[in-house]
Image (cartoon, rainbow, N blue to C red):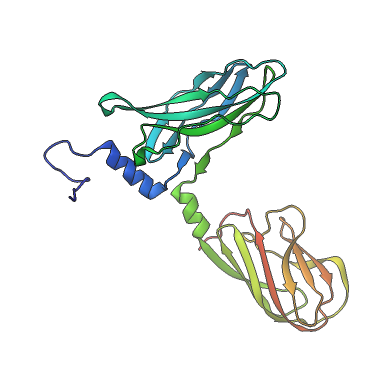
């Protein structure tokens, strides 16, 4: 039977299960830490204690808030043995269907060989599971020493980041040794170059700097030379770009007609529309 959830019914009728189903349908059937607060950052305090910072997470549609930092105790390791512990966020449905969530340290099995992660509860509450664990960190122990924690969660980007990744901008760029321009198109942080040109000079270049520069908004992110244009046809001409916008030339344009292609990543601010 259909039911209007987001509507007035004259009585309490919206359930946590319905809210979780909506979250899971929008965010996906996975577990995520949200990009807010301390993002559940972990700090190793001592040989048997870690602190988990503030943050928000969504596990199988269930929203869990960590409003204040929390200390967790890790059972001491043993000399000559290794162990993997897991820090998880544990969902539980108890008597009278009361639901809760808490951070738990799941202890692994000590071994003199290669340690493995302990088993966790994997039946989703969306599928009727009454206990479910979202792994947050692996805590490796070597003897009595806690190693560097390993994050095991996915960070869910906000919709603003998704929008930025789909934003498109375009411009034209005049090619060295030519009166022609090619197209530069940016989608998110990826830039594409393409077009046809007629070179009006010939001569061998050995990493020579061009007069032309790459416009702001399209410059390569890497600090080293990045191929931004590779020309075909009767040329052996390649253009390399730098994060400063400087362009380096290699090869001979050979007075030829040629096609051009290039793809690279940029860290520049998105150009205005």
Q: Where does the image place residue 132, in percent across and percent down from the top left?
A: 42, 33
Name the residue located 71 percent from the left edge and 81 percent from the top edge.
197
Name the residue located 52 percent from the left edge and 56 percent from the top edge.
165
Name the residue located 65 percent from the left edge and 73 percent from the top edge.
194
Q: Where does the image place residue 121, in percent across and percent down from the top left?
A: 45, 32
Is 251 placed above or below 157 here? below
Q: Please say whether residue 62 is visible from this viewpoint.
A: yes
Q: Where does the image place residue 149, in percent across and percent down from the top left?
A: 62, 29
Q: Nearer the viewer, residue 193 or 110?
A: 110
Q: Please say whether residue 39 is visible from this viewpoint.
A: no
The outermost residue toward the left is 10
Q: Nearer the viewer, residue 239 or 262?
A: 262
Q: In which quadrant of the rendered view does residue 270 lie? A: bottom right
Is 115 placed above or below 221 here? above
Q: So how many labels did they put on this image? A: 0
Q: In which quadrant of the rendered view does residue 114 lie? A: top right
Q: Is residue 133 found left or right of 95 in the rendered image?
A: right
Q: Nearer the viewer, residue 256 or 44?
A: 44
Q: In which quadrant of the rendered view does residue 18 lie? A: top left
Q: Nearer the viewer, residue 52 or 246?
A: 52
Q: Where does the image place residue 156, in percent across and percent down from the top left?
A: 48, 44
Q: Is residue 193 found left or right of 157 in the rendered image?
A: right
């Amino acid at each position: 039977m259909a039911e209007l959830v987001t509507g007035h019914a004259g009585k309490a009728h919206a359930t946590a299960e319905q809210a979780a189903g909506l979250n899971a349908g929008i965010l996906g059937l996975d577990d995520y830490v949200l990009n807010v607060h301390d993002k559940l950052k972990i700090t190793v305090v001592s040989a048997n204690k870690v602190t988990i910072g503030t943050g928000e997470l969504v596990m199988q549609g269930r929203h869990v808030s960590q409003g204040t930092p929390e200390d967790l105790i890790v059972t001491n390791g043993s000399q000559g043995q290794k162990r993997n512990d897991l820090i998880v966020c544990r969902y539980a449905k108890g008597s009278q269907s009361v639901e809760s969530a808490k951070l738990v340290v799941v202890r692994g099995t000590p071994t003199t060989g290669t340690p493995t992660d302990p088993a966790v509860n994997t039946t989703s509450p969306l599928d009727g599971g009454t206990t479910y664990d979202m792994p947050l960190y692996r805590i490796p122990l070597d003897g009595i020493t806690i190693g560097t924690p390993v994050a095991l969660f996915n960070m869910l980007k906000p919709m603003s980041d998704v929008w930025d990744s789909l934003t498109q901008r375009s411009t034209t760029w005049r090619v060295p040794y030519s009166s022609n321009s090619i197209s530069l198109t940016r989608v998110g942080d990826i830039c594409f170059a393409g077009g046809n040109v007629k070179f009006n000079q010939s001569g061998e270049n050995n990493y020579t700097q061009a007069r032309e520069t790459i416009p702001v908004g399209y410059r390569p992110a890497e600090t080293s030379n990045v191929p931004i244009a590779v020309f075909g046809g009767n040329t052996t001409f390649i253009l390399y770009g730098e994060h400063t916008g400087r362009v380096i030339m290699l090869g001979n344009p050979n007075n030829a007609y040629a096609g051009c292609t290039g793809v690279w990543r940029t860290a520049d601010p998105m150009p205005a529309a």
